[in-house]
Amino acid sequence: MAYSSSRHQSEVMKRRDLKASSFLKINKLSDIAGAEIIDIDLREPIKLETYEAIISALLEHHVLVFRNQKLSKEVQVEFTKQFGELEEHVGRLPDGNRYPLMHTVTNLDPATGIPTTAPHTHGNYFWHTDKSYHAVPSLMTILFAVDVPPTGGDTLFCNMHAAYDALSKSEKEALIGLKAVHSWEASRLNTGNIPASEEQKRERPPVIHPVIRTHPETNKKSLYLGMHVDHLCGIPTIESRRLLETLLENATVERNIYRHSWQKGDLVMWDNRCLLHRGDRNYDMSAHARILHRTVVKGSKPI
Ligand SMILES: [Fe+2]
């Protein structure tokens, strides 16, 4: 059974008293973000009550970790479809082909298949929210851990509600109405990646989003930033760059971060509408494989 985002939004709002813990075994992983859900097999279609409990838990904890899953690529795609329409990627594989809807995040060299310190792309090691260079960016991203290093290779999540809440009254007022230009081209430049091709620039022209984003389901405000931002509208380049760096630096402080240490079989789902995330190179990339299967669900235009 598939449940669309718009359908679940209205249904979840009608059931404000729903207790996710009534339908799921949930353990909070940190106060800032993250909860693990145990004793659920995601290979099976989920019931409406379970679906709503998952969404409620996601809205509360922002990052959900489903332990001990065994998912083929096909089953992960089917699982993801229950949360909305899957999103394609503008990026290209080393062979020039487009990423499939289910693509692999890996440090394996595409030619040799052995771990490398210089994978094909490394943008995931910089703070970002997925596909903010889209006019309608991602709602949810799902990563399934196929193989992970014995230690390290973590993924960090930064709670951008908390980052916004920590601003002073005057800092918040200064950001009201401020907009930022996000683009695939800027993302590639900001991360020292292979530059965007002319075809990719045509496919993903720059888009403008508010710096203060209001979550469409909880109405809570957050800062909407990250490596896909090119500049702030109406502010000179140098000043824009400084302000972006300051906002990001102040946002991504330790107290706002949940660090996920992967276990093989983890399926991690997160809400891109209120988080930044990045991978951590805190492992020997030349010795250990880190292979994650990724699916992404389309969201709504930020307001
Ligand atoms: Fe990402």
Image (tube, rainbow, N blue to C red):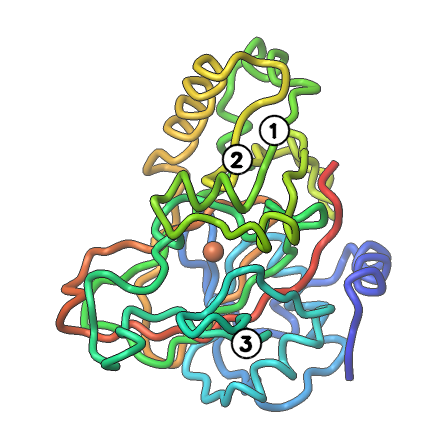
Sequence order check: which comes first, mark 3 or mark 2? 3
Around disc 1, counting alpha carbons within 10 Å, would you say few (fewer than 14), some (14 to 19), or many (20 or more)? Answer: many
Q: Position of residue 50 (x, y in %)?
A: 69, 76
Q: Position of residue 208 (x, y in %)?
A: 68, 34
Residues under labels 3 and 2: Cα distance?
Answer: 25 Å
Determine which residue is flagged by label 3: 102
Sequence order check: which comes first, mark 2 or mark 1? 1
For label 3, the SS is loop
Q: Are marks 2 and 1 in contact (CB under 8 Å)?
A: yes
Q: Position of residue 139 (x, y in %)?
A: 65, 56
Where residue 229 is drawn, which disc sits there?
A: 2
Which of the two residues, 51 or 3, is positioned nearer the viewer here?
3
Quarter placement of the N terminus: bottom right
Which of the two residues, 170 or 97, is positioned nearer the viewer here?
97
Residues under labels 1 and 3: Cα distance?
Answer: 29 Å
For label 1, the SS is strand
x 58%, y 54%: residue: 200
Q: Amino acid at mark 1?
A: Ala
Residue 253 picture quarter: top left
x 21%, y 79%: residue: 114
Determine which residue is flagged by label 1: 180
